[in-house]
């Protein structure tokens, strides 16, 4: 039985912006992560193959989101005001 995944289509035109890839510059880290994840052999990842329930997000999409979310936070630009955390008494 075929596994049902929500389709990954990063080239689908949208109303605003016209293309998802227009949101980030070509040199952005996310493009590197997508390229690396697309090269990985993910055939050992277990998914719901029964076909019950809603369509699943593709393991490549979820792995890319996980990797991107775990990256170190970038430093703010010079002169950018830093927020100070004030703890109440």
Image: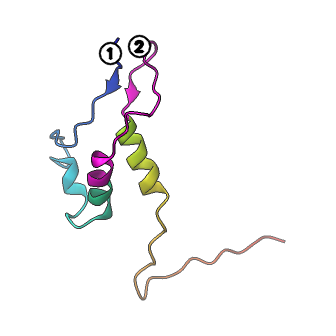
**Quarter of the rendering occupied by the C terminus:** bottom right
50 inside magenta stretch: yes
Total marks in image: 2
Q: Is residue 49 above or below residue 87?
A: above
Q: Quadrant of residue 43?
A: top left
Q: Quadrant of residue 24?
A: bottom left
Q: Is residue 58 above or below residue 80?
A: above
Q: Which residue is mark 1?
A: 2
24 inside magenta stretch: no
Where in the figure is residue 37, as x and y percent of width and height?
A: 33, 49
Element type at mark 2: loop
Residue visible at 28% across and 65% down in the picture: 28
Where in the figure is residue 53, as x and y percent of width and height?
A: 46, 15
Prevailing secondary structure of the magenta residues? loop
CB atoms at circles 1 and 2 under 8 Å apart? yes
Q: Nearer the viewer, residue 2 or 64?
A: 2
Of labels 1 and 2, the one closer to you = 1
């Amino acid at each position: 039985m075929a596994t049902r995944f929500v389709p990954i289509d990063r080239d689908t035109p949208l109303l605003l912006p016209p293309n998802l890839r227009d949101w980030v510059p070509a040199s952005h880290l996310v493009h590197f992560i997508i390229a690396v994840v697309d090269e990985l052999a993910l055939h050992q990842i277990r998914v719901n193959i029964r076909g019950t329930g809603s369509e699943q997000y593709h393991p490549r999409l979820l792995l890319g989101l996980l990797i991107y979310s775990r990256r170190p936070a970038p430093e703010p630009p010079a002169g950018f005001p830093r927020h100070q955390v004030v703890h109440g008494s």
